[in-house]
Image: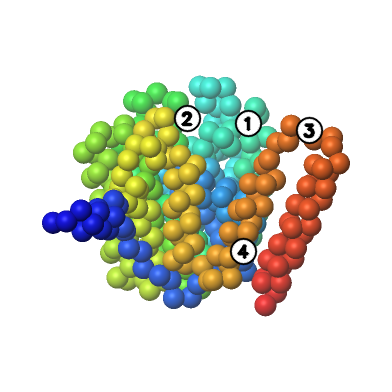
């Protein structure tokens, strides 16, 4: 083989296993209203979407890792079911909260917790009723039970107070299908979080993810308003390198989350929205710029230019929502 042909073969080599994602038929735009729920990966995606000026629901629970806790939270949003004093506990770290919330929702007093938790719940419930798209990221098929009920977080309580249960695919599907079917007007985007639950061990983590994947597959056969996006597969098979992980080697870097979100946009957003997202991302980077000489005329002119760009982009977004 001559040198030119060798070079041509080398250039044409594929260095990634590209994961195919099914394009969404009815693509979303800036008029779409999103509710994100599920693992901390869902929280990360919601933060990125807000930074890009999408309409997203306020967080009412914090990260919810297992499907049972996720369904419980969605049912509360669906029925606007508030929390009461009987569900408030004081935890070993000194804060007051509930077993159905993440630690970040805990407060110094029971009254402060209830006021904050119920205010967030009411706002999220109002948003849920008009949400077009619900994005759920399932983190683990393992759940923890306390006094016979599945909890969202153990809040550093003694481990002997909890019982770990493994949710089989059929169990997960059976508990999630009813709320999807009760809300046929919403698109339910489901994905499995690529964040690894290493406390279960390597094999245990894979079994857990497999149960979630099989459950979603079963649900799609029953509900035609479920769309699956392969976040887990993109990280496992397309990125496949520790440089895409944070220092703990389980969570993801910001760049990895951004990469997945960009892939998501390519498959589910219309062309006008993708173009707008690109412009807003560029603007956001410029707005994060920290000048050496902030008091100069040149920097003031630069800020005025950015303010005008932001105003024009927000006006474009508003026009898209009014179409």
At label 1, counting other C-alpha atoms closer than 10 Å, the crowd grade (few under 14, some 14-19, many 20 or more) is some
Give the spatial CA distance, label 3 vs label 4: 30 Å
Secondary structure beneath dot 3 equals: loop
- Left or right, 107 with reference to 93: right
Contact flag, marks 2 and 4 (Cβ < 8 Å): no
At label 4, counting other C-alpha atoms closer than 10 Å, the crowd grade (few under 14, some 14-19, many 20 or more) is some
Disc with the residue nearer the chain's start (2 vs 4):
2
Disc with the residue nearer the chain's start (1 vs 4):
1
Image quarter where the N terminus lies is bottom left
Q: Where does the image place residue 129, in percent across and percent down from the top left?
A: 59, 65
Secondary structure beneath dot 2 equals: loop
Find residue 161 and name its label: none
Give the labeled residue for mark 3: 293
Q: Where does the image place residue 243, in percent across and percent down from the top left?
A: 38, 37
Secondary structure beneath dot 4 equals: helix
Give the spatial CA distance, label 2 vs label 4: 41 Å
Q: Where does the image place residue 37, in percent across and percent down from the top left?
A: 49, 52
Q: Nearer the viewer, mark 3 or mark 1?
A: 3
Find residue 155 and name its label: 2
At label 2, counting other C-alpha atoms closer than 10 Å, the crowd grade (few under 14, some 14-19, many 20 or more) is some
Give the residue drawn at x 45%, y 26%.
Answer: 156
Q: Name the one closer to the observer, 139 or 1.
A: 1
Secondary structure beneath dot 1 equals: loop
Give the residue drawn at x 32%, y 40%.
Answer: 241
Give the labeled residue for mark 1: 107
- Left or right, 233 with reference to 34: left
Residue extending farthest left: 1
Disc with the residue nearer the chain's start (3 vs 4):
4
Q: Name the one closer to the observer, 264 or 306.
A: 306
Q: Nearer the viewer, mark 1 or mark 4?
A: 4
């Amino acid at each position: 083989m001559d040198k030119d042909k060798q070079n041509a073969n080398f250039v044409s080599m594929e260095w990634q296993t590209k994961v195919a994602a099914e394009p969404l038929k009815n693509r979303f735009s800036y008029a779409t209203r999103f509710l994100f729920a599920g693992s901390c990966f869902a929280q990360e995606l919601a933060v990125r979407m807000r930074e890009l000026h999408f309409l997203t629901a306020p967080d009412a629970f914090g990260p919810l890792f297992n499907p049972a806790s996720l369904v419980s939270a969605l049912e509360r949003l669906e029925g606007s079911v508030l929390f009461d004093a009987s569900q408030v506990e004081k935890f070993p770290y000194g804060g007051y909260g509930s077993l159905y919330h993440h630690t970040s929702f805990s407060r110094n007093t029971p009254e402060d917790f209830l006021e904050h938790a119920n205010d967030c719940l009411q706002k999220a419930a109002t948003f849920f009723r008009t949400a077009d798209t619900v994005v759920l990221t399932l983190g683990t098929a393992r759940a923890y039970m306390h006094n016979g009920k599945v909890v969202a977080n153990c809040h550093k309580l003694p481990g002997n107070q909890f019982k770990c249960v493994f949710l089989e695919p059929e169990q997960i599907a059976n508990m999630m299908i009813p709320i999807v079917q009760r809300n046929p007007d919403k698109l339910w985007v489901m994905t499995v979080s690529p964040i690894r639950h290493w406390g279960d061990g390597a094999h245990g983590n894979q079994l857990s993810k497999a149960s979630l994947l099989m459950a979603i597959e079963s649900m799609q056969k029953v509900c035609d308003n479920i769309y699956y996006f392969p976040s887990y597969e993109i990280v496992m098979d397309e990125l496949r390198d520790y440089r895409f992980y944070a220092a703990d080697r389980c969570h993801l870097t910001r760049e990895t989350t951004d990469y997945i979100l960009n892939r998501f946009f390519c498959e589910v957003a219309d062309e006008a929205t993708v173009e707008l997202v690109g412009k807003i991302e560029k603007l956001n980077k410029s707005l994060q710029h920290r000048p050496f000489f902030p008091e100069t005329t040149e920097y003031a002119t630069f800020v005025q230019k950015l303010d005008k760009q932001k105003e024009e982009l927000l006006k474009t977004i508003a026009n898209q929502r009014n179409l």
